[in-house]
Image (spheres, rainbow, N blue to C red):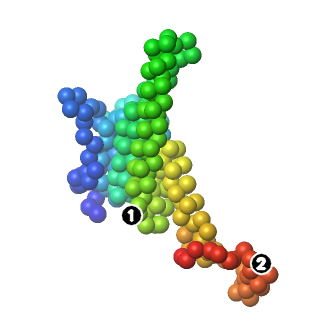
Amino acid sequence: MANGENQNPNPNPIEATPGAAARTITLKTADGEIFEVEEAVAMEFGTVKSFFEDDAVSATKPMPLPNVSGSALSRVITYCRRSLEIRSMIPPATSEDATAAEAVQGEGDLEAEKAAKQERKEFEAEFLKDESNEDVKELILAANYLNIKELLDFLCRSVALRIQNKSVEYARKFFGIEGDYTPEEEAQIRQEYAWAFEGVDED
């Protein structure tokens, strides 16, 4: 990757809303890629939001993200942009003292919320469909560093599903964990608790 002075084309540009001059925030990844990110999307990143709230002057300069790669940030942007779109499908909550007409409208809001949940479910199912375990782990590190709770929760749930009913060896490899027991000790444990190793899925 070229050094940070060479601004690489953003592989996942954030398009401004037609007819609106959307403010953008510049982010620089660990591998030197420069991203011009729409402010609404960038503010989904807790780390970025805090950075600019503490130092408004820095809003005119690229914010360095030393722990995030360009490929990971591109995927994070995709998730947060779509998440914002899905959230916008849900109207504001109806107050308890709403009129009858507003109450009817509130019923429509429930349908909108249901549709939004289904939309998110479908989007998230596709989002990680072609991602390897290594890619998912890189996204977790990026989401954690950027402090994006919604994305981090989703990724952690996805990891739980990936290792569900898998072998001990698979889980160790996934998390990079070395065994604490000698081969002899492990063989003895497997013999004593054979039931715990039965019926696991193929790795």
Task: Quarter of the image for the C terminus: give it.
Answer: bottom right
Outermost residue on the left side: it is 19
Give the spatial CA distance, label 1 vs label 2.
Answer: 35 Å
**Which residue sits at x=58%, y=60%?**
160
Give the label on residue 2, or none. none
**Residue receiving disc 2:** 193
Q: Where is residue 90 in the image (x, y as percent from the top left)?
A: 43, 31
Say if 41 sits above or below 166 in the image: above
Say if 179 sits above or below 184 in the image: above
Mark 2, Cα crowd under 10 Å, few <14 / some 14-19 / many 20+, is few
Asked whether the residues under the numbered discs 1 and 2 touch, taking CB atoms below 8 Å apart as contact, a structural biologist would say no
Say if 102 sits above or below 114 in the image: above
What secondary structure is marked by label 2? loop
The answer to whether any part of residue 80 appears in the image is no
What secondary structure is marked by label 1? loop
**Which residue sits at x=47%, y=37%?**
114
Looking at the rendered structure, the kind of residue marked 1 is Asp
- Left or right: residue 33 versus residue 114 is left
| Of the pair 87 and 150, the residue shown nearer to us | 87
Q: Which of marks 1 and 2 is nearer the N terminus?
A: 1
| Of the pair 181 and 111, the residue shown nearer to us | 111
Outermost residue on the bottom side: it is 184
- Left or right: residue 174 versus residue 14 is right
Looking at the rendered structure, the kind of residue marked 2 is Tyr
Say if 113 sits above or below 202 in the image: above
Mark 1, Cα crowd under 10 Å, few <14 / some 14-19 / many 20+, is few
Task: Quarter of the image for the N terminus: give it.
Answer: bottom left
**Which residue sits at x=51%, y=54%?**
155
**Which residue sits at x=38%, y=64%?**
130
**Residue receiving disc 1:** 130
